[in-house]
Image (spheres, rainbow, N blue to C red):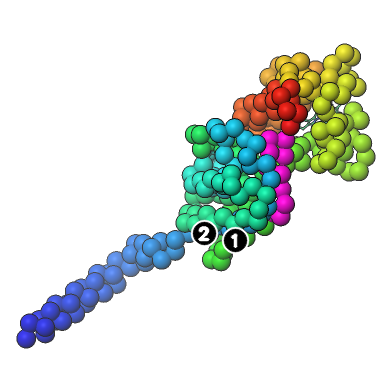
Amino acid sequence: MRKKIYKFSLFTLSLFTFLFVSCDSGDIEEQSYNVTDKGHTVKLTAVLSGIESWEKKYSVSLAGFTTGDNYAQVVRTIPYTTSNTQMELVLANIDDNINTVELVITNRLRERVITLASVNMDEYVNVKDTIRMDLGLIDVSRFGALQLGLFDKACILCHGGNGGTGAANLNLTEGMSYANLVNVPSTRKEGMMRVTGGNAQESLFHQIMAEGGENLLHVNHTEILSNQFRENLNEVRQLIDDWINSLGDNNE
Ligand code: HEC
């Protein structure tokens, strides 16, 4: 007898729920959609080298960002121990307000320092499957980050990307950039080095990227930089300086 009452009330309850749902379909439907849809999943596979070369205040991360905001909404730090091994990292529950998922250097505040690779989530709105980010072998050291995040993105268009030596005889493509910059005399500014190892302030590279560097050359490089890095301009400038200043120590 008791059992029956129990069953009956359960039935009433579900009937009530059913009526409730059908009366108020609009909102409820959307809510239940959100409950079953836990968002997107991105899976990174890669062999990363140079993670261990970063100071502790920086992390190599897989992180989700909203356009216009330099602070990551979700972050997974890639452990130092995975350096030079085939690794796999999953970022799940990525909701709709995240526009890009990036392999990125972040600082302690979860701010973007520089982006090495990016997936545009807006292209996957209706995709339910795991989104794969296969990057192969990549160098994520400080200089590797400058190559992928800065030179490849904002410089090789003019400096060597089309097979030539590049504007001002400066080739910034992968494998060429370091030897074209470090302790190489400027072809434009008499007596200056493109990069003076260990001294950012005295390096033309630093000067043309910094505020006030607009008119040093015939091409406004300060503007090129600020157009490309709207959200993380200061972080990129700091990274350039940190790299140049570190050159005295270990030439990395
Ligand atoms: C729109 C084309 C263009 C882009 C993009 C560009 N540059 Fe240049 N760059 C030039 C030109 C042209 C010169 C020579 C300017 C002159 O003669 O005054 C130059 C000169 C330089 C020099 C001085 C070379 C020397 O020997 O003195 C450096 C360093 C430099 N660029 C670095 C960069 C970096 C780093 C980037 C990316 C952030 C970049 N450039 C992006 C066109 C470009």
Mark 2, other Cα within 10 Å: few <14 / some 14–19 / many ≥20? many
Where residue 68 sits in the image (x, y, percent)? 55, 39
Q: What residue type is labelled 1?
A: Ile
Query: To which residue does mark 2 refer?
Result: 40
Q: In screen coordinates, is 94 left or right of 18?
A: right
Residue 124 occupies quadrant: bottom right
- Relative to 5, residue 39 above or below: above
Q: Is mark 2 on a helix, strand or loop?
A: strand
- Relative to 144, residue 211 above or below: above
- Relative to 122, residue 219 above or below: above
Q: How many marks?
A: 2
Q: Are marks 1 and 2 in contact (CB under 8 Å)?
A: yes
Given residues 54 and 120, the one toward you in this image is 54
Query: To which residue does mark 1 refer?
Result: 131
Q: What element carries label 1?
A: strand
Mark 1, other Cα within 10 Å: few <14 / some 14–19 / many ≥20? some
Residue 9 occupies quadrant: bottom left
Quarter of image, ligand 1: top right
Q: Residue 155 carries which label?
A: none
Residue segment shown in magenta:
135-144
